[in-house]
Amino acid sequence: MRLAYTPEQIAFRAEVRAWMQAHVPATPLEHYDATRAGFEAHRAWEATLKSADWGMVTWPVEYGGRGLDLIQWLIFEEEYYRAGAPGRVNQNGIFLFGPTLMEFGSPEQKARFLPPMASGAEIWAQAWSEPQAGSDLAGIRATARRDGDDYVLNGHKIWSSRAVFADWAFGLFREPGSERHKGTSLIVFPLTAPGVTRNPIRKINGHVGFAEILLEDVRVPAFNRIGDDGQGWHICMATAGFERGLMLRSPARYQVAAGALAALWQARKSGADISGSSEIYPLDPALEADVIRAHINADAYALSIYQTASRLIAGAKIGPEASTNKIFWSEMDIHLHRTALAILGPEAELIVPPGAHDWLDDYIFSLAGPIYAGSNEIQRNIIAERMLGLPR
Amino acid sequence: MDFTLSDEQLMVAAAARTLLSDICGPDHWHRLMHDGRAFDPARWAALVENGLTAVLMPETAGGMGLAELDFALVAIEAGYAALPEPLTDSAGVAMPMLAQLAPGHALLADPAAIIALAPAINPWVAAADVASAIMVERDGRALLVRRDDATLTPVETIDPLRRLFRLEFARAEDLGPADWDLALDRAALFAAAQGLGLAQRSVDLAVAYARDRMQFGKPIGSYQAVKHHLASAQVGIEFARPVVIAAAADCPSRDIYARARISEAKLVALDAADSAARAAIQVHGAMGYSWEVDVHLFLKRALALTNAWGTPHFHRQRVAARVFTRPTGPDTTFARDPLENETPHA
Ligand SMILES: Cc1cc2nc3c(=O)[nH]c(=O)nc-3n(C[C@H](O)[C@H](O)[C@H](O)COP(=O)(O)OP(=O)(O)OC[C@H]3O[C@@H](n4cnc5c(N)ncnc54)[C@H](O)[C@@H]3O)c2cc1C
């Protein structure tokens, strides 16, 4: 136990901070889900990151990373969020599919897919969910039929984040005639391939954040299958572990938000007019307890992730406790943003001018947290059955 | 940066758990309650004999000279066992305090001695009846009141394995200015650590029951409503534990960050204990509402510890002091106050 950074880690932080200060765009980019222009601006940012090898610092050098450990990754993330750097448009690639490839991909597949992923040249979407298969993912119907050296893909995927503008997708398919967890394979396909139709779906914040994907006789080489034939379910569960356990939501995000919440509270308490409106609304002093709670939650989450990172460095593996993470961050996010809106009072509903802190949009986004990456109800089932040993 | 416990620390925790499960289980609780007592001299002797009272004592006083983190691991197990004896107050706070204030004091020669604590923050004194002496906070000084010089008036608490007293005394030994801030930090930290143990025991009791109890032809633990109660309780525990561990590791730094972290630990761990106990009662149905099932012990101990050594409001204020007067944000998780940092962080 040593809760202090080494001189190397301190120097690394300084290096990241200096780079971020010099490179993070002064004005926020348009949201990557809002327009093609916003999406491409984020792709350009990924290329900027890559130009200094910041694309994915934990990856081996040969795949475009720096070969750093998870503590360094956390430091990187902390400085990234601290600098207010743009959201990672390729998060489904670098945080989910990347680690999956690292574990299950062949050397050729890694060499083919990881470097352009690290640079943002290829942006990834996750194509797992289907209209009939959400929580019950084993109910997928999309098929991959083997035809010589190819697979022919058919089916209907949905809720695929950023698929409207993305380049590639990693999808879960089944051998025709197979059932449930058997006969599934993880196969990647270009979203621009003949036979792929993408229909944008509007989210409740108005953005076309996800898409349905229709696949009609989409032909891809067998090279595009990750892992063994029929191993798809197993691989997807490992991916879900990365997603819930560590990488998808780094603690820095909530620490920044909790800090901003504390600043909002203090500004309001001192009577400052922060939104440009002339009205000052009376403040409920009881909300301070929630502001403090938000700080404590963010701190607890950060400490927990440092603990997990230390354990993984010491050789442990992520287990079912990853499900507790997903519940904790999603619920903390909602609590934090509900507190912000309560402080804003009547202003909470107002659409925020560009550039201002958008508590409202962040609140709306937080409401998706308990749904995606496996709903919180499903996570509670997993905790009860696999951590606590309750019967199915 | 390394957030893992050492093998030695894991061994200390495992040894404490094994010992306590042998000498402080349901039969022992029931016997004490039946006898109307909250102290078992034989168990106290076993704790002493196995070194659990020596963890935080300096080596010069015959102790092991270990740190708060090591003792916190023991305190977690004390919570898990709903230990009635004042191990954390006496061996975790009062005895080391005496060793610091009066290195040659006669009480230190007796490894089985118990000192109860009367800090300004607590209205009543816990376990004063079984103590050799009571350490009283007065204007920043420590007064040591021998048991014979104390008049104790019992104050009834709902926790059947805890005793509280109002203290009056005519004579005391003045030990001089004392570090009551450290006493508060340690006591709050060890209350938090016990909270973790209490919480896990509540969940474990409820899980065991939910696997056995059949309704509608199935174990109740197969129903989602039951599962989700316990899963939520476990989430609370999982995210309280790293806070308690970090608070314990930070404790020696003694700056505003360390104090805030201890307060956070006390808030989240006793919250987890309270939620877990209530979930466990619900999962047990009427059984959980009966004296026969032990869950109520964990509910009651959590209630007591939630408000002892600083109420939630008090601890929130300490966190607020850190949040509103120091930088926040992702680079401050392990921040230290250079001005107040007396000993450089090793
Ligand atoms: C913002 C957002 C982004 C997303 N991005 C992607 C993406 O990029 N790629 C992708 O493949 N998918 C994506 N999804 C889809 C997501 O994975 C699914 O929404 C999720 O798996 C739940 O499936 P569903 O929506 O069909 O809900 P359902 O499974 O129909 O569930 C509806 C409700 O019933 C509950 N429920 C279902 N089964 C049980 C059960 N056994 N026990 C208890 N409760 C149950 C659920 O918890 C939920 O509350 C995204 C979703 C959102 C909201």
Image (cartoon, rainbow, N blue to C red):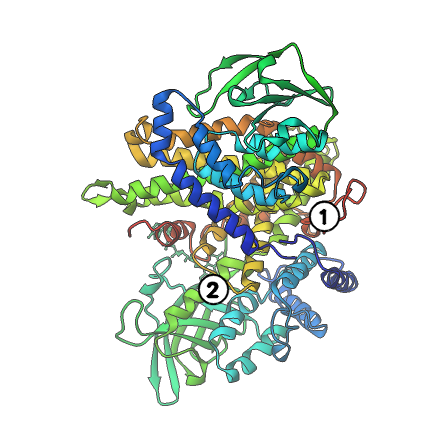
Q: Which quadrant is home to the N terminus of chain B?
A: bottom right
Q: Residue at x 37, y 54 (%)?
A: A386
Percent from the top left, x then y, of residue A31? 62, 59
**Which three-letter amino acid code belongs to the residue tagged 1?**
Ala
Percent from the top left, x then y, of residue A166? 54, 70
Dividing the picture into quadrants, the one containing residue A360 is top right
Q: Residue at x 55, y 79 (%)?
A: A113
User: Would residue B315 be seen by someone viewing this image from the given angle?
Assistant: no
- To which residue does mark 2 refer? A211
Q: Nearer the viewer, mark 1 or mark 2?
A: 1
User: Would residue A229 be seen by someone viewing this image from the given angle?
Assistant: yes
On screen, residue B81 above or below A160: above
On screen, residue A187 above or below A347: below
Left or right: where A128 falls relative to B308 = left
- Give neighbour class at mark 2: few <14, some 14-19, many 20+ (Cα, 10 Å): many
- Give neighbour class at mark 1: few <14, some 14-19, many 20+ (Cα, 10 Å): some
Q: Residue at x 63, y 18 (%)?
A: B145
Distance, label 1 to label 2, CA atoms, is: 43 Å
Dividing the picture into quadrants, the one containing residue A207 is bottom right
Percent from the top left, x then y, of residue A201? 47, 60
Left or right: where B117 falls relative to A158 = right
Task: Assign a secondary structure to mark 1.
Answer: loop
Dividing the picture into quadrants, the one containing residue B33 is top left
- To which residue does mark 1 refer? B335
> Does mark 2's beta carbon lie closer than 8 Å to ligand 1?
no
